[in-house]
Image (tube, helix red, strand yellow):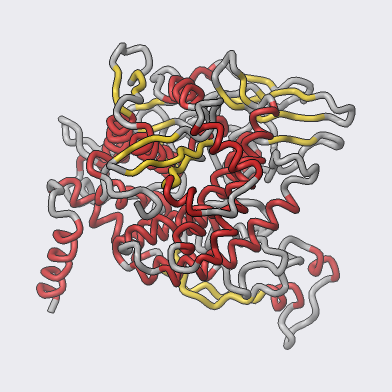
Amino acid sequence: MVAARRRDADEFYAALGPDLDDERMRVLRQAAAGLVWSKQMYPYRVSRWLDGDPAGPPPPERHRHLRNAGWRHLDAFDVLAMPDPWEYPWFAAWDLAFHAIAWAHLDPAFAKYQLSVLLREWFQHPNGALPAYEWNFDDVNPPVHALAALRVFVLDGSTDTAFLERVFQKLLLNFTWWLNRQDPDGNHLFGGGFLGLDNISPVDRSHLPEGVRIEQADGTAWMAAYSLAMSILALLLAAENPVYDDMVVKFLEQFVMISEALEASGLYDPDDGFFYDRLIDAAGNRTPVKVQTLVGVIPILATVGVPLDQVQRLASLRKAAARRLDASESDQGQPFPIRESGGVHRAVVSLVTPDQARRTLTHLLDEDAFLSPHGLRSLSRRHAEPYAAPGLPGATIDYEPAESTTSMYGGNSNWRGPVWMPTNYLVVRSLLLYDELLGPDFTVEHPTGSGSQHTVREVATDLADRLVGIWLPDGSGRRPVSGGQRLMTEDPAWKDNLLFYEYFHGDNGAGLGASHQTGWTALVVDLLLDPPDRARQVFGRR
């Protein structure tokens, strides 16, 4: 029986990755096994937690006003993919979206269930918010559900439009919640607070000093990307039901408003070629937080290609989106240039110009800044010399490739230098979109300063290789993920047993954080099975 099961497993993985060598197959098998191990029943009735057990003494009154008090409707009893059932035995919204992408290779039905369940009425708040994670459902995670749904749709064969429609309808509520709650001034520049990046800023972006507000480069860019993902979802649905044409228009219009607001905002520094957050005090003074983190990279992720025949089919397309398309067709200014690729003409809809993308990539691909041997650091290594936010005493940040020394968020999170898989993954897949849309003539110097020009597909391939290389043995048989642990590098019983950590040392790739974390680190499965050098379509139907 055991031998039969092992043979079945061998056949399964061989079918998934027939071209993988033994070591990459080892990474694939163990990452996938970790995903399966991380499935867990999650029961949590918030009202009972707030009110106490009916058979026991009532809890103190203050218990009714603690965190999650506004989530009485949440009544979970579902099997979920946990970040780590040992150290983090609860779901996290944006983690779960990335789990689903990896799961789509193993069990597409379960992957779709993971994306759908948080949008059900027993999870999603009546106001449209998605619960962030058990510690505080009110925290705000990046809105990546729509992107994940598109990726899962593609990996599942691009046929299950009923799944897309179900997800789309509920994401409409969530999108509206973002508009109402995270853009209080109605200027199309968004906040959101920490947005899952914990202590990536010198300031706690969720708890600012009295009278201080923040305009976030990443909050605004996430919403631009959300708008584009929703427009592609609507475009796919409109192919079968023209009622959705109006929603294509709506989300393209929304994107244009965000794009124009970001362009006029000054969050992009043309001298540095980088996007920064900005603090606004009670007197209206605006101060950029000029620290180079992945926050400033998120804007280059908001890019899609809309087939020109689809744009022309939308006879109701008017106003801002139409003006921009008309301008690009007549060569009167940017932003929606028409490109031909594979015989299809597309309007390239992007939050940044190709020049802005290229300048941002100059920082990203600099080995003295973001580019490490094992992926992209969350904070530029140039900040080895600490940066202090102007006017906020004690708000400092410096490059810390391993564990954080700040007490922000309990001191147990670190986006101040380490390599994190989800953001690296998004950069890799976005570079493939640039390659598809802008073609092989769009090249960048890689690494920065090397004098060697590469297509962005070649850059994406190199970044993916660096990430996968975290688990591959070097010439001496040592795997970067194991760091200097002799047991894990030398003992025959341990050295080939891999751990998929929460994040990785920014210089040497050693695993850090939750040591059993498969979670979103299992995105390595997608990089192995759909590598950039021969990747399928990235997010939507061609």
Q: What residue lies at 65% left-to-right and 63% top-to-bottom?
A: 173
Displayed quadrant of residue 63: bottom right
Residue furthest out toward the bottom:
55
- In the rendered image, which quarter is residue 440 located in? top left
Residue at (54, 19) in percent of width and height: 273
Which residue appears at 80% of the width and 42% of the height? 185
Query: Viewer-proximal residue, 246 or 205?
Result: 246
Q: Is residue 289 above or below residue 194?
A: above
| Quarter of the figure with the N terminus | bottom left
Q: Position of residue 15 (x, y in %)?
A: 16, 61
On the image, the x and y values in percent for residue 256 come to 62, 40
**Left or right of residue 134, residue 215 in this image:** right
Does 72 appear above or below 485?
below
Residue 95 versus residue 319: which sits nearer the camera?
319
Specify whether residue 219 is in view. Answer: no
Q: Is residue 483 left or right of residue 195?
A: left
Among the 4 quarters of the image, the one containing residue 338? top left
Task: Out of 55 and 440, give the one closest to the viewer.
Answer: 440
Does residue 214 appear in the picture of this structure?
A: yes
Q: Looking at the picture, how far across and down is residue 484, in whole percent?
A: 31, 34
What percent of the width, then of the height, locates residue 9? 17, 67
Nearer to me, 76 or 182: 182
Is 433 on the left or on the right of 49, as rendered?
Answer: left
Number of numbered discs: 0
Vertical side of 391 occupied by 518: above or below: below
